[in-house]
């Protein structure tokens, strides 16, 4: 046994029971570590609230759900603290499962104390040697990135409710990442071995959406040459994600309600009842209570969907997550396109931190990718975000033009205003109205490249 008590003054959390963890605890004590023991998941989660640990050891005998919860909580609260899973049978599949949960190492137990300490020291030395991040440490939980208080609260909620089969309603502005949250809920939950099936209710007409959800029988309509399974059948045993649920027409809402109440439906043109068992996660950026008052959304369906409600915060309320998100987007861009972007210039970061992001995380990602494509070197400079600066006018109207007062949301011009100035003000006003460059270009009837060119010329002016 080593005589150097290199763990003095540090503590480790040991979750679980059995001979394997007895060896771990003895090894930690021999190196000077203080062990905090938690026999099960509730005790381990409670101990994680009391402060950071040098490392977390968790027994695989706790079960997949409890282990996933402990690993996720440790990663969310202390991203720099490694979690080591102690195996039950020592199989390759166990090791793979542990790594997929987020563990940094896997021990086959029971083993010798010296082997435990060697693995722990290797993990801690690897963490210490890792280069510091270019921005605040990011927690990447199933693609959800952030360290803000709002983000930590959101991840904690995902962790709590994902273990149940309850229906979930996700509320929040467009672009905040509601589908990512839905995927995380499915991937961490008891239905993760079955399919996650997404559908956007806003992109399909009434008849098409109904056919997609419930399928049809052969001969149900012209062209129905064979039976087709609907998305509910595909999601049986898994999760169906209904994005933009507020856009669903009243007739389909009634049929959806029946499925939620009875777990059964009939295919279009059919008479036989089809039984299904799946979780439903619905999402919308609209105010459903207002939609109920205007009779555009069924109140009974609303209460069926909102067994658990999660409100996803807009990016402007968690701007401290922007540096971490930028790093994640740059890394993703480099991976997909073979790029060599190393980071973002301080002046460029200042622009992004000061912008309000009406399009939320989706708009930020598009802006970073666009700037990465146009970057002339390994660092993205402020020129890459000239269009964001151009949202606020960089020049005033001609000095000779008489003052004209415009109503909110409109643009007014004095007679004789140059056409170039008219175009500039219309483009900038459209950007302010829609928030997204893609939506603005589509509304104006011009190409996205043309819009970028105009915005750069305004910035240069």
Image (cartoon, rainbow, N blue to C red):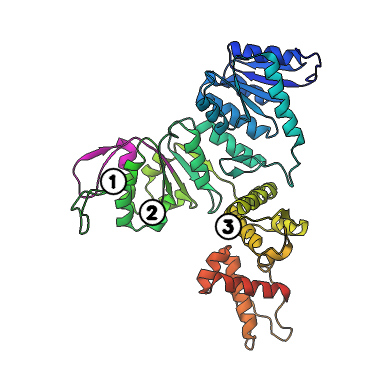
Q: CA distance from mark 3 to mark 1?
A: 35 Å
Q: Which residue is mark 3?
A: 359
Residue farthest bottom in this picture: 416
Secondary structure beneath dot 1 equals loop
> Looking at the picture, how far across and down is residue 189, in whole percent?
47, 33
Q: Is residue 433 left or right of residue 342?
A: left
Q: Is residue 44 magenta?
A: no
Disc number lying in front (2 or 1):
1
Q: Is residue 318 left or right of residue 192?
A: right
Of labels 2 and 3, earlier in sequence is: 2
Of labels 2 and 1, earlier in sequence is: 1
Q: Is residue 52 visible?
A: no
Q: Which of 115/201 is in front?
A: 115
Of labels 3 and 1, earlier in sequence is: 1
User: Relative to residue 262, is residue 347 depicted above or below?
Assistant: below
Q: Which mark is residue 296?
A: 2
Secondary structure beneath dot 2 equals loop
Segment tinted magenta in the rendering: 258-281
Secondary structure beneath dot 3 equals loop
Q: Residue at x 56, y 45 (%)?
A: 312
User: Relative to residue 399, is residue 391 depicted above or below?
Assistant: above
> Looking at the picture, how far across and down is residue 352, in whole percent?
69, 57
- Few, some or many residues within 10 Å of mark 2 (<14, 14–19, 20+): some
Q: Which mark is residue 229?
A: 1
Disc number lying in front (3 or 1):
1
Q: Residue at x 56, y 50 (%)?
A: 176
Q: Is residue 301 visible?
A: yes
């Amino acid at each position: 046994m080593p005589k150097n008590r290199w763990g003095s003054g540090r503590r480790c959390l040991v979750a679980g029971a059995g001979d394997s963890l007895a060896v771990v605890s003895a090894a930690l004590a021999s190196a000077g570590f203080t062990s905090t023991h938690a026999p099960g998941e509730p005790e381990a989660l409670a101990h994680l609230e009391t402060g950071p640990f040098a490392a977390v050891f968790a027994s695989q005998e706790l079960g997949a759900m409890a282990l996933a919860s402990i690993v996720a909580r440790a990663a969310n609260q202390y991203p720099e603290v490694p979690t080591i899973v102690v195996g039950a049978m020592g199989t390759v599949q166990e090791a793979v499962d542990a790594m997929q949960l987020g563990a940094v190492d896997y021990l086959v137990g029971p083993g010798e104390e010296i082997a435990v300490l060697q693995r722990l020291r290797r993990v801690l030395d690897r963490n210490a040697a890792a280069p510091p991040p270019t921005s605040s440490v990011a927690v990447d939980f199933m693609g959800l990135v952030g360290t803000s208080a709002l983000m930590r609260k959101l991840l904690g909620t995902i962790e709590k409710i994902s273990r149940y089969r309850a229906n979930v309603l996700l509320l929040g502005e467009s672009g905040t990442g509601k589908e990512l949250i839905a995927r995380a809920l499915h991937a961490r939950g008891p239905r993760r071995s079955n399919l996650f099936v997404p559908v956007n209710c806003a992109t399909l007409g009434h008849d098409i959406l109904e056919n997609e959800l419930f399928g049809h029988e052969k001969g149900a309509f012209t062209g129905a040459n064979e039976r087709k399974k609907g998305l509910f059948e595909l999601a049986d045993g898994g999760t169906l994600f209904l994005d933009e649920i507020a856009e669903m027409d009243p007739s389909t809402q009634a049929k959806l309600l029946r499925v939620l109440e009875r777990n059964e439906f009939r295919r279009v043109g059919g008479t036989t009842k089809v039984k299904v068992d799946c979780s439903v996660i619905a999402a919308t950026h609209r105010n459903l209570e207002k939609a109920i008052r205007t009779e555009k959304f069924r109140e009974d369906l609303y209460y069926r969907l909102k067994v658990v409600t999660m409100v996803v915060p807009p990016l402007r309320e968690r701007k401290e997550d922007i540096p971490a998100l930028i790093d994640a987007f740059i890394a993703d861009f480099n991976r997909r396109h073979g790029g060599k972007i190393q980071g973002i210039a301080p002046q460029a970061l200042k622009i992004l931190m000061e912008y309000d992001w009406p399009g939320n995380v989706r708009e930020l990602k598009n802006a970073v990718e666009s700037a990465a494509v146009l970057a002339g070197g390994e660092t993205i400079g402020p020129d890459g975000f000239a269009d964001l600066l151009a949202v606020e006018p960089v020049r005033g109207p001609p000095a000779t033009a008489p003052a004209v007062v415009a109503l909110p949301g409109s643009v007014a011009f004095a007679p004789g205003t140059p056409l170039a100035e008219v175009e500039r003000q219309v483009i900038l006003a459209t950007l302010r109205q829609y928030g997204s460059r893609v939506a603005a270009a589509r509304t104006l009837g011009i190409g996205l490249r043309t819009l970028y060119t105009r915005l750069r010329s305004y910035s240069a002016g």
